[in-house]
Amino acid sequence: MFDPAGGDAEAERISRVYERYGSSPGRAARYSAANLGNRAIVAERDRMVDAMLGRLGLLPLTGRRVLDVGSGFGHELARMGDLGARPADLVGVDLVPERVERARLAYPAIDFRTGDGRALDLPDDSVDVVLCYTLFSSILDRPAARGIAAEIARVLKPGGALVWYDMRYPSPANRNVRPIGADEIRAMFTTFGATIRSVTVLPPLARRLGSLTPAVYPALARVAPLRSHLLAALVKPGSR
């Protein structure tokens, strides 16, 4: 997202935060894929993303270029291969070099880059789909967030889509993130067509469901106040 070597205060802050995340056994356990609630959260999100891309006429992704800004360990970007994307058409950009290295090791055919989301090394109108999963909530500096939004708008093709997934509620235990509501999403992408819906059972609740998860998670997901995140499709004006 940013270049901490360049002295950017927000970049340095985010780098320090993610270093602490990476060395925290408690955080690793909390987000473990062994937890049935975490699995249900990811499965619900992925199912809805797939349906969203289908409704936009973007599936299959064969021949389409997909960019993941804040690509982390690369799992979400690699999953686009299940939707027809070719590895050569996938690009991931992340601030944290250690995460980029792990993504490269896990998915060597995909182009993962350490980079600044405010200066993406991609041509104008060159990307069909951009993924932003829990990216903007980690950026407390609003001008920096707007800079990334502007770059995403620049590289997206007309008719291309940004797939947004991020928290809409504050996290009292984590001051390094902030919630982002639908109005702020629309304000960052004022000219884009927007479809926004709430998803994801509150993670602290979902993680406690245990063996009841398959039966109880879908019921809880129907209760709007219990949905902690927003999933959005933001479409750049124009036609593909």
Image: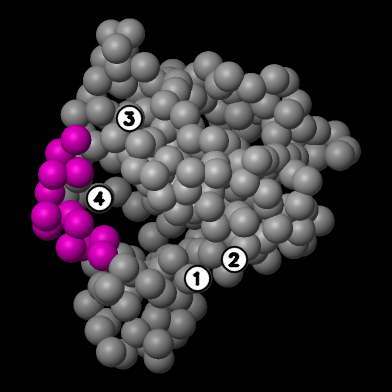
Q: Nearer the viewer, mark 3 or mark 2?
A: 3
Going from the N terminus, do you reach mark 1 or mark 4 first?
1
Which span is picked out in magenta? 19-32
Q: Residue 44, labelled with which disc?
A: 1
| Discs 2, 1 touching: Cβ within 8 Å | yes
- Residue that mark 4 sits on: 171
| Discs 4, 3 touching: Cβ within 8 Å | no
Q: Say whether residue 163 is visible.
A: yes
Q: Nearer the viewer, mark 4 or mark 2?
A: 2
- Which amino acid, mark 2? Met
Depth check: 183 or 118 in front? 118
> Marks 1 and 4, Cα distance to the nearest angstrom?
21 Å
Q: Residue 97, labelled with which disc?
A: 3
Left or right: 93, with 8 as reference point: right
- Total numbered labels: 4
Going from the N terminus, do you reach mark 4 or mark 2 first?
2
Q: Is residue 63 above or below residue 59?
A: above
| Discs 1, 4 touching: Cβ within 8 Å | no
- Which amino acid, mark 4? Ser
119 drawn magenta = no
Residue 41 screen position, x and y as percent: 41, 68
Q: Residue at x 78, y 46 (%)?
A: 63
Left or right: 154, with 140 as reference point: right
